[in-house]
Image (spheres, rainbow, N blue to C red):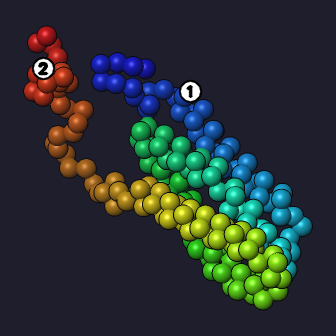
Amino acid sequence: MLNSQGFRLEDDVALRRVLYVTGFVLILVAYAQVINAVRPFGFGSLQWRLTALNILSENLNGPFLGEVIVLTVARFAGDKLMARAMGILAALTAIGLILSFGIFLLDVVQYKAIVKTVEMQRFNKAAYSTGITMLLFTFTSSLLAFAALRNLKAELKPVVKGAKTLSDEKPQGMLFGQDMKSK
C-alpha cells in the first residue's frame, strides 16, 4: 500500500484488523492477569488492597500500549468511533487510577503504623514505586483521553457544501507548488 502519497492505513483492512486485535489483546490479557492474580477478592483486607494495587501498577504497561496502538490505528484510518471508544476507555482508566491512588494513600498511612521498623525501608520502597507508577499512568492515560477526544466537537460540525478539502487539491512534488505531472 505504498504509493506516491505514502502509506494509507485506511486502504489496508487486513493490517488494520491485525493491529486492532493486537491492541485489544494487550488490553484484555493484562487486565485478566491482574484479576487472576488478586483472586479471591478481599476488599476488606488492608494487605489484599495494597497487594492488588501493587499488582495493578505493575501491569499497566500492556493496557496503555494497547490503547495507544488502537487509537493510533483509528486516527490514521479515520475510524472516529474506535478513536472515541479508546478515548473513553483511557478516561475511565485515568478516573479509576485517581480513585485507586486515593485509596492507596489511605491504606499506606494505615499500614505504616503496622509495619515493623526492620521492614519499613522495604515497605517505603514498594509504596513509592507503586504510587509513582500509578501517578505516571494516570497522567499518560489522561493525555491519551484528551488526544482521542479533543476534536470531538469539530468532527460533529456540519460540513459546508462547496468547501475545499484535502482530497480536492492536486498532488504536489517534493517542492511546494510543483505539480507531479510536470516532471
Q: Residue at x 63, y 38 (%)?
A: 22
Q: Position of residue 129 (x, y in %)?
A: 65, 66
User: Can you say which quadrant of the picture contains the C terminus?
Assistant: top left
- Residue 139 is marked as none
Residue 11 or residue 175, whichever sits in front: 175
Q: Secondary structure at mark 2?
A: loop
- Residue placed farthest to the right in the image? 40
Q: Residue at x 23, y 36 (%)?
A: 166
Q: Position of residue 177 (x, y in %)?
A: 10, 27
Residue 110 quadrant: bottom right
Q: From the viewer's perspective, is residue 81 above or below residue 129?
A: above
| Badge nearest the viewer, 2 or 1 | 2
Residue 95 quadrant: bottom right
Q: Position of residue 100 (x, y in %)?
A: 66, 74
Q: Amino acid at mark 1?
A: Ala
Choose the circle earlier in sequence order: 2 or 1: 1
Badge 2 is on which residue?
A: 179
Q: Amino acid at mark 2?
A: Asp
Badge 1 is on which residue?
A: 14
